[in-house]
Amino acid sequence: MVKELEEVVDVPVVHVCTVVPISLTVGANRIDPAIAIPYPLGNPQLNQEEEFALRRSIVEKALQALTTEISEQTVF
Amino acid sequence: MLEKGEAVVAIRVVHYLNQFFGQIGGEEKADTIPFCKNGPVGPGTALVNALDKDMTIVGTVICGDTYFNENIDIATKEIVGLVAGFNPDLLIAGPAFNAGRYGLACGAVCTAVQKKLQIPVVTGMYEENPGADMYKKDIYIVKTGNSAAQMRNAIPALARLASRIANGDVIGSPAEEGYLARGIRKNVFHEQRGSARAVEMLLKKLKGVPFVTEYPMPVFDRVSPRAAIKHLSQAKIALVTSGGIVPKGNPDRIESSSASKFGRYDISGMNDLTAETYETAHGGYDPVYANQDADRVLPVDVMRKLEQEGIIGQLHNIYYATVGNGTSVANAKKYAHAIGEELKHAQVDGIILTST
């Protein structure tokens, strides 16, 4: 999906995912490692505020990936 | 040397399974840490019957798919230790069919055991399994169908190759033996010269008749990275997910596995996804956490905050979702193409794709 979106829309796409080796094999260019498979952008053990801050940090890294020029697959 | 009447020493086989086939449970048990049992479990029972008579499954090592994939290095080490404890002559893993996490686990465990314990290994999976691409160069991966419904055909195929490897037979080509090509070239004598074979192939090609190449070209299925966003504060960012986040009640009835469609959902004015409004349709991970708070998979709450703060220009008001669980590569590409056409039309500047 990630490659086809990048090809069709012609804009940068960042893949937020937990199992980075799979994303690398699939061919995602910008990869943002996540927390866990059932909750990539969260952690149920944290309180609401902490969890929001954690999620924000992963999204900010995704935005950093979208605003960084790359020439090859990059894990942020 | 064996004396007449002496019991034949059996070939000791260890079998690796995930929590599901290891009969521990479904997604709610996917975080099970590695452990072992004596003898065969689940598909191991059928495997024993299909293997050569002198081969016995002395033990089964079981690990949850999520635990493995979230802790690849530690889990691999733990599993290699458990496998070594059985003092085996051969390891069989899976088959994993098209289960991505399981395929990666089977591939990683086999590769590590082959290297660390210096014993032959064999696993089975569907050729689109991401584990296949990652490990087919290192190990024998028997080609299977894409779901456990194919178990009946997969077991004999896996057993056949495992038995041949255990017996020290010379293993033939991928096509003859039914495993995924490993990219190994062997010199062989052919009754026909290369030039004659090439002309034959060319003639067939000209006639439009099917022919088999002797040297398949590698497929480089890569997309060049697009230029970065210059002005984030003016950028329109879209969210897409393969994690199955849908409005409560799953209005489009997106299937929990092998999804036949994707959904588009309007989130205008929506600042937070809650347990009352959104849920996951995905059947390939424990849904408890996403159902409590779907922002854990699709971060609408954070994106709205960043929009309010002016860090991003805007969050695109439509998000797209499908279920990436046993989905064929062809379908994933098809859905992404259709989604892409819409996002292009909407003039988005960047896309965040989240996967579970």
Image (cartoon, coloured by chain):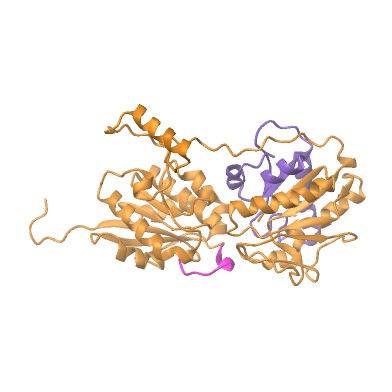
The kind of secondary structure the magenta stretch mainly shows is loop
Per the rendered image, the range of residues in magenta is B22-30
Q: Position of residue B169 (x, y in %)?
A: 25, 46
Residue plotted at (29% across, 57% down): B12
Q: Is residue A67 left or right of residue B189?
A: right
The answer to whether residue B11 is visible is yes
Q: Position of residue B129 (x, y in %)?
A: 53, 52
> Up-down: is B149 above or below B12?
below
Among the chains, which one is purple? A
The answer to whether residue B77 is visible is no
- Image-quadrant location for residue A65: top right
Chain B shown in which color? orange
- Image-quadrant location for residue B278: bottom right
Q: Is residue A53 left or right of residue B99?
A: right
> Up-down: is B19 above or below B330?
below
* Magenta stretch: includes residue B27: yes
